[in-house]
């Protein structure tokens, strides 16, 4: 695909984003950037959140990973759906009752200032790494498809993407993102559907042939009952519940969108709809993965292997789309990955800015002019942080989605433990020891997992988040106030 055509597609897409930004930035208040004035239509928010949750990770990493992990990821998705029920009926009512802007201020009400700051800081760390890793994957593909042709270094590519995101989100923040995420979701899903249709036609399949080819393929293994494996059903399902609660329900990025809905009922409808649309979309991308490998096999396209497993699986979808599937599929892929690149970071940067300015700078107490200055400085700082993290991980290999969830298991575990203890008990803890407990818990989890692998050949897998949260809760209980 011509680099100039790629450039034209990306430029056109960015132009649409800027138009949306211009329209939504009219009649904004000081709080529009953080709350969207709490007037967002719930259906729009639900559909747009799918794009933010998918990002380039689902778009590229999930189709590629089926060769080594089969459909075991669906076990995790089933757990996610169960976790969303907890978010809908437990967490969202709490957030609306307390009228929160930053959801971590709940911890201040429940435990105290140290717990509040610690919870927010763990989110800032988690979200910075998560958004950077999501953008990394999309940026690498855009580098291959466009920027390499003009001999532009990768670090400049990342810088360009971050500047473009800043341009359309800087003024209205979440108010703009609610609408741009909807557009991004549409292009992400459309790219998958178009690619499946193109492969179906290339392989001369009917619709029923396509369904049979996917469901009868050796990669179509949904359940793993090997208890020692990291992909065991119970480990995946339970961790799916906990990671959904942590990475969605306790994540300022995702909840900030939900809290822009007009009322509690709309917010709950938004979250329920989002969970089912997301699950169906993830199944679609897993099916796409099998279709990609079927096409590669039939056309004699060799894929690099090491120790009996495919490597560089994240490159499968972009390589085939840009070099083998024709113009329509190439354009849809470029639109999809561009949408993924922007949706990976735009709402994350807004959420990071919201959490830091409210939780550490008390921006709601400042004058309007000071609010704007603080918001801009913090937003710039987080752009730099995301940029630096991307540079550190720029040489990483394998599927990025596994890296993201492994990191999440360590960084979100203490946050999950704090919220669960706060919601389901009346225990009062010694607030000042909370930071030390929340630092110790993930370190202990890491070494415990390493020990289990070495001694018992037992991998906790994504269950790290469960162990991490339990260690946090137990230590917090030991740190309860003596008058309890």
Image (tube, rainbow, N blue to C red):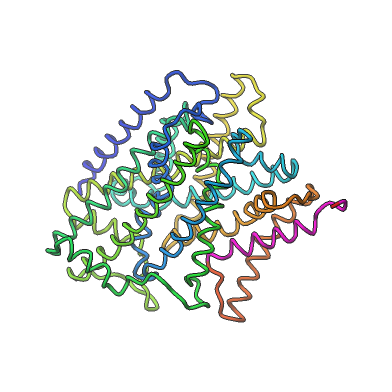
Dominant SS of magenta comes to helix
Where residue 437 appears, x then y in whole percent?
A: 73, 56
- The residue at the point 37 percent across, 78 percent down is 308
In the rendered image, the residue lying farthest to the right is 483
Callout count = 0
Residue 115 is one of the magenta-drawn residues: no
Whether residue 261 is situated above or below residue 128 in the rendered picture: above
Occupied quadrant, residue 447 = bottom right
Where residue 232 appears, x then y in whole percent?
A: 48, 72
Whether residue 465 is situated above or below residue 150 in the rendered picture: below
Given residues 53 and 483, the one toward you in this image is 483
Whether residue 229 is situated above or below residue 321 in the rendered picture: below
- The residue at the point 26 percent across, 67 percent down is 214
- Residues in magenta, as a range: 462-483
- The residue at the point 81 percent across, 49 percent down is 430
Given residues 461 and 16, the one toward you in this image is 461
State left or right for residue 123 relative to residue 298: right
Given residues 55 and 389, the one toward you in this image is 55
Occupied quadrant, residue 41 = top left
Where residue 415 appears, x then y in whole percent?
A: 63, 51
Where residue 391 appears, x then y in whole percent?
A: 48, 51
Residue 467 is one of the magenta-drawn residues: yes
């Amino acid at each position: 695909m011509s680099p100039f055509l790629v450039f034209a597609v990306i430029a056109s897409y960015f132009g649409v984003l800027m138009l949306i930004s211009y329209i939504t930035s009219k009649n904004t208040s000081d709080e529009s950037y953080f709350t969207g004035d709490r007037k967002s239509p719930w259906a729009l928010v639900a559909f747009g959140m799918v794009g933010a949750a998918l990002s380039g990770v689902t778009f590229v990493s999930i189709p590629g990973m089926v060769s080594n992990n089969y459909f075991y990821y669906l076990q995790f998705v089933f757990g996610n759906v169960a976790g969303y029920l907890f978010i809908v009926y437990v967490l969202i009512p709490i957030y609306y009752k307390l009228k929160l802007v930053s959801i971590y201020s709940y911890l201040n009400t429940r435990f105290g200032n140290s717990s509040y700051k610690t919870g927010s800081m763990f989110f800032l760390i988690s979200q910075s790494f998560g958004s950077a890793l999501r953008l990394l994957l999309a940026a690498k593909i855009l580098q291959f498809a466009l920027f390499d042709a003009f001999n532009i270094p990768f670090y400049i590519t990342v810088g360009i993407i971050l500047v473009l995101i800043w341009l359309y989100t800087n003024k209205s923040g979440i108010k703009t993102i609610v609408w741009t995420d909807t557009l991004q979701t549409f292009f992400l899903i459309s790219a998958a559907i178009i690619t499946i249709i193109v492969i179906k036609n290339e392989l001369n399949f009917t619709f029923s042939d396509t369904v049979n080819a996917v469901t009868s393929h050796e990669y179509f293994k949904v359940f793993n009952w090997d208890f020692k494996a990291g992909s065991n059903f119970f480990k995946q399902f339970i961790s799916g519940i906990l990671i959904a609660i942590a990475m969605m329900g306790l994540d300022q990025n995702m909840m900030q969108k939900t809290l822009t809905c007009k009322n509690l009922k709309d917010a709950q409808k938004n979250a329920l709809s989002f969970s089912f649309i997301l699950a169906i979309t993830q199944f679609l991308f897993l099916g796409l993965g099998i279709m990609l490998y079927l096409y590669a096999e039939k056309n004699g396209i060799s894929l690099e292997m090491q120790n009996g497993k495919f490597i560089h699986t994240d490159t499968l979808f972009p390589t085939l789309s840009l070099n083998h599937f024709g113009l329509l599929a190439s354009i849809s892929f470029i639109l999809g990955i561009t949408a993924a690149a922007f949706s990976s970071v735009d709402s994350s940067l807004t959420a990071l800015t919201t959490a830091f300015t409210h939780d550490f700078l008390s921006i709601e107490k400042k004058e309007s002019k000071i609010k704007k200055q603080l918001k801009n400085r913090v937003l710039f700082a987080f752009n730099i942080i995301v940029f630096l993290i991307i540079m550190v991980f720029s040489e990483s290999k394998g599927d990025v989605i596994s890296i993201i969830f492994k990191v999440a298991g360590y960084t979100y575990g203490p946050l999950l433990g704090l919220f669960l203890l706060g919601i389901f008990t009346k225990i009062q803890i010694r607030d000042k020891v909370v930071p030390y407990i929340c630092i110790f818990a993930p370190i202990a989890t890491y070494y415990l997992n390493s020990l289990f692998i070495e001694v018992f050949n037992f991998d906790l897998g994504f269950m790290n988040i469960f162990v991490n949260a339990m260690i946090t809760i137990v230590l917090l209980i030991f740190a309860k106030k003596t008058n309890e």
